[in-house]
Amino acid sequence: METPEIKKTSYRRLPLLIGAVSACCLVAAVAFAAVGFAHRPIKLAAVPPANLPAPAPVAKTTPHLPLPGEVRGIYLTASTASTFKNFVAIMNAVKTKGANAVVLDVKADSGALAFEPSSPALKGEAPVKKLIPDLDRVVAAVHGDGLYLIARYPVFEDPAFAEKNPAIALHVGSGGLWHDAKGLAWLDPAAEAAWKYNADIARELYARGFDEVQLDYVRFATDGSTSKIVYPVYDPKREKLRGTIGRFFAYMDKELRGAGIPISVDVFGFTTWHQTDLGIGQWYADALSHFDFVSPMVYPSHYPAGTLGFKNPAAQPYAIVADSLKKGNQVVAQLANDPAHPKIGAQRPWLQAFNLGAVYTPAMITAQIKAARDAGSSGFLLWNAANKYAELPDLRP
């Protein structure tokens, strides 16, 4: 039986593109099956703001592992890492299946950091729920197993920081904080103070030994009464959703990748299909232009009936993943021909390792991995919110 935390995490990634966005996805999916997709010219005008103060550098205190030639990663929650013995047991088990990377949550469900920060920029500023008693011990254990370590955390879905800083959080007309369908508060994506806070978290984690920082929930809010949202900073008359998220991408690129910190970002799987912002601000070309790795969540169960002509896309793991990444490769190729984008990120998809829409057997997982490899991806990440990986196939080529 799922715990409340696991249940929430299981559905946090469902791309509930409501209203017109959902209709657009359904119609476009059928159209793609028949005629394919012609990309529109991509022009990026995302320029990081100049009015943010330069953050103090964080000294590197812990060695890092090199990036594997093919990242074969599994997702683990902060709650799993809170019990060190169980955490190590899962790592040892997945390593025997060929996993060489761990994606670890470093925030609690509340948005509070799951560890005690040490940098002055975060001490006293960041809400903390210390699920991971000894972060340095966890990092040492992962590296001791020879596993590449990725820190994952949500950016704009952050109830704890929103409650502490209501001036940069989404509101309703009455003045209280806006909450999504899960009861969670969000930060205004245009609030530059939120940008700096998340960059400070990344610097802290890299200094503590994480080999890469992965950002999630880098988008405008969905899954709730979005028509009631009052933005304290974002002004739709001055900037489109894509422009705001694009400027955030550029800022993190400059502050983190510019300082030698490897960064990646999670995006909805449909961003590879539609060169629009899906009503959330995510644009695939923008992400590829500013991150080392882009991880579309191409879980077959999250695609609507009729996608590529399939009644149940969840039962077609190879076809869905392969086609999604093929469309992503078209965006990569277009950027490669544009001299304005000299450093383009690589595709590294999130794959389904949970039962939804179909029972995901080892063969179903293997089919997705084959699709990722056939598409030339730099690796893959496996998502199971309950962190149950006993039935994994052998992940090695």
Image: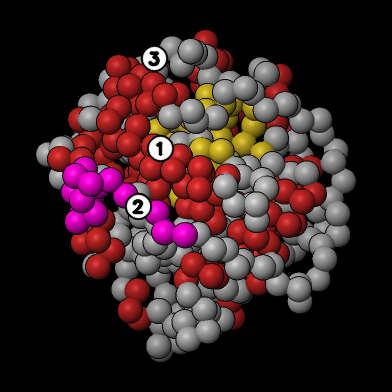
The residue wearing badge 3 is 393
* 37 in magenta: yes
| Three-letter residue code for mark 2 | Ala
Which of disc 1 and disc 2 is earlier in sequence? 2
Which residues are the magenta region?
26-41
Q: Where is residue 349 in the image (x, y as percent from the top left)?
A: 46, 36
CB atoms of marks 1 and 3 within 8 Å: no
Which of disc 3 and disc 1 is earlier in sequence? 1
* 359 in magenta: no
- Label 2 and label 3: CA atoms lie apart by 36 Å
> Does 130 sit left or right of 309 as displayed?
right
Q: Is residue 336 above or below residue 316?
A: below
The residue wearing badge 2 is 38
Secondary structure under tag 2 reads loop
Nearer the observer: mark 2 or 1; the answer is 2
Identify which residue, 135 or 94, lies in the foreground. 94
